[in-house]
Amino acid sequence: METAHPIIMVLTDDAWITQAVVPLLEENGYIVQRTRSPCGSAASTAATGDLLLVDEATFARGQALGEICCGRVIVVGRAASRCRQIEALESGADDYIAVPCNPREFLARARAILRR
């Protein structure tokens, strides 16, 4: 169920995410918290974040799902192979989005996950 002001944790420094997606999320009422530390804020991310956006590299290192967020996760990557997308989904990610994509599509996917 979507909260009044969902908190989206962003664990990536991908320029497209920070320049195109983060402002769109904020314009649509989401609280965006950016972090570069995959392990430093593990407890607070799991406790306060409604959705985690994590880049493929961090996810692949095994620092994402179990250690950072026990909730909803979108993995973002560039020109990913189908195998990587499938691996992320089988490892517990709720979605995998190859970026860049249409920012409105990204927003729609985030909303869909937050409705669950």
Image: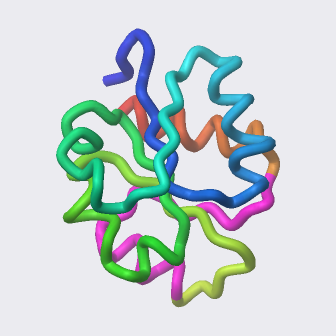
Query: Could you say where residue 83 lies in the image, as x and y percent from the top left?
Result: 53, 89
Q: What residue lies at 51% left-to-right and 41% top-to-bottom?
A: 34
Q: Is residue 25 left or right of residue 20?
A: left
Quarter of the image for residue 80 reads: bottom right
Q: Is residue 96 left or right of residue 65?
A: right
Tell me: residue 58, above or below residue 73: below
Quarter of the image for residue 87 reads: bottom left
All told, the count of numbered labels is 0
Q: Quadrant of the C terminus?
A: top left
Q: Quadrant of the N terminus?
A: top left
Query: Could you say where residue 45 lies in the image, as x and y percent from the top left?
Result: 29, 42
State the colouring used for the structure image: rainbow
Tell me: residue 82, above or below residue 69: below
Q: Nearer the viewer, residue 15 or 83?
A: 15
Q: What residue lies at 33% left-to-right and 35% top-to-bottom?
A: 49
Quick check: is 97 in the magenta stretch?
Answer: yes
Q: Is residue 2 left or right of residue 42?
A: right
Tell me: residue 109, above or below residue 7: below
Tell me: residue 95, above or below residue 49: below
Point out the residue furthest to the top here: 4
Q: What residue lies at 71% left-to-right and 73% top-to-bottom?
A: 78
Q: Which residues are magenta?
A: 84-101
Q: What residue lies at 41% left-to-right and 33% top-to-bottom?
A: 114
Query: Could you say where residue 41 lies in the image, as x and y percent from the top left?
Result: 28, 48
Quick check: is 49 in the magenta stretch?
Answer: no
Q: Is residue 70 left or right of residue 87?
A: left
